[in-house]
Amino acid sequence: MALNDSQVKDEMEKMVSFIKQEANEKAREIKIKADEEFNIEKAKIVRQETIAIEALYQKKAKQAEIQKKIAESNRNNKTRLQILQARQQYLNKINEEAQRALVDFANNDPKYAETIKNIVLQSLYQLMEEDITIVCREKDLNTVKKAVEEVAPTYKEKTGKTATVKYSPNYLPAASAGGIIMSGFNDRIVINNTLENRLEIASDELLPAIKTLLYGASESRKFYN
């Protein structure tokens, strides 16, 4: 049976209503899905940014810690250097005082002549040569000559050698602490027995003991010369 106009209109309205309902439901589904995707993407971005911020913070914190350690190390090194410099200055002062005492001993102490005698004999034993040259202070020349005369018999008795001595006109500095420089074998072998040189050798050998006496034992030091 054919539909009249009123029935056709009703059917059309029903179809339109159904289509609108389907469209609205579809739109709601799309919106819900879009909202879900948006929230997921938003959470992802927030998480990435959070991770990036935490990484940046950790990097900055690590850099700050490194800078702190560097500054602390520099400060400790500076302090340590100042302490070492102060100690070295004090050791230098002790050495300078010892040198002045040597000069005073060489110029004023009657025992200096006996010291020269011992040094001459020791130098002869070290050199073990007959033709030798001695360098000394000009003011010590007579003292040294007398010492050579006194020790020559002992040297000959012990070694069987007769020392023939020449005295160099190139004297040690007048302000020095004395002693002698003896050479032999055409000056190829030189024995430096000036009091300054003997002081330097003694200072090097005694330096660890002096440091221990002045500053206490070093915890890091395991060996001693």
Image (cartoon, rainbow, N blue to C red):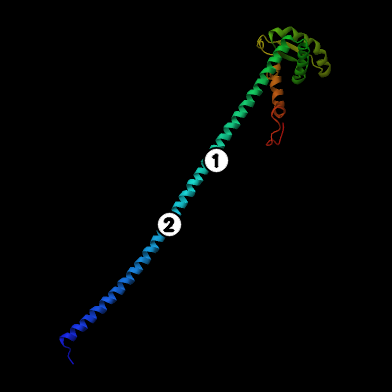
Q: Which residue is mark 2?
A: 48
Q: Residue furthest left?
A: 5
Residue at image location 56% in from the left, 34% down from the top:
75
Q: Quadrant of the C terminus?
A: top right
Q: Quarter of the image holding residue 219?
A: top right
The amino acid type found where label 1 is placed reads Lys
Say whether residue 76 is left or right of residue 60. right
In the figure, is residue 189 to the left or right of 74? right
Residue 83 versus residue 37 in the image, above or below: above
Rendered residue at 83%/18% (across/down): 158
Gap in angstroms between the C-alphas marked 1 and 2: 31 Å
Residue 186 in sight here = no
Mark 1 lies on a secondary structure that is helix
Task: Tell me the quarter of the image containing the N terminus.
Answer: bottom left
Question: Residue furthest toward the bottom?
Answer: 1
Observer-nearest residue: 203 or 160? 203
Q: Quadrant of residue 210?
A: top right
The residue positioned 65% from the left and 22% from the top of the image is 92
- Rendered position, 52 above or below 170: below
Disc 2 residue type?
Answer: Gln
